[in-house]
Image (tube, rainbow, N blue to C red):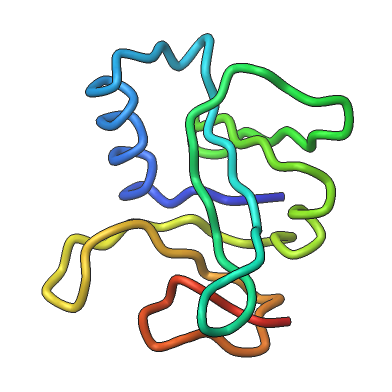
Amino acid sequence: MIYVSDKAKEKVKHLMQDASVEAKDYFLRVSVVGGGCSGLSYKLDFDNEKKPMDQEFEDNDVKVVTDLKSFLYLVNTTLDFSDGLNGKGFYFSNPNASRSCGCGESFAV
């Protein structure tokens, strides 16, 4: 499962509205890609096409889809959003990460 906090839900809904995409037609695609100072980075996109091996979840009224390979890194991860002074944006609480970089945008397992 991939979880979505209340703050992340509100920001996703707001961004979907700004991008003029309908929540009934689109979902949030979460991916893990190579890169960043710790080796792996998170990627977020709106998408409307599912692939055969995609894993689909819904939490807090947000539909989240990820490919199977990324899901192995994302099991029980929570997507959150911060708008505080220490940084603004989405971040992941990932229990599978053994370390993450100072900026929080990459991780290692």
In this view, 67 is above or below 87: above
Residue displayed at 74% across by 65% down: 73
In this view, 19 is above or below 106: above
Residue displayed at 62% across by 33% down: 58
* Number of callouts: 0
Residue 2 screen position, x and y as percent: 64, 50
Q: Nearer the viewer, residue 5 or 66?
A: 66
Residue furthest right in the image: 53
Residue 79 screen position, x and y as percent: 49, 55
Q: Nearer the viewer, residue 79 or 20?
A: 20
In this view, 65 is above or below 80: above
Q: Nearer the viewer, residue 58 or 51?
A: 51
Residue 88 screen position, x and y as percent: 22, 63
Residue displayed at 34% across by 25% down: 16
Q: Point out the image quarter for the C terminus.
A: bottom right
Q: Nearer the viewer, residue 106 or 6?
A: 106
Horizontal arrangement in the rendering, residue 74 relative to residue 61 (left or right) = right
Residue 48 screen position, x and y as percent: 59, 17
Residue furthest front in the image: 35
Residue furthest left in the image: 85
Residue displayed at 58% across by 70% down: 35
Horizontal arrangement in the rendering, residue 79 relative to residue 77 (left or right) = left
Horizontal arrangement in the rendering, residue 81 relative to residue 48 (left or right) = left
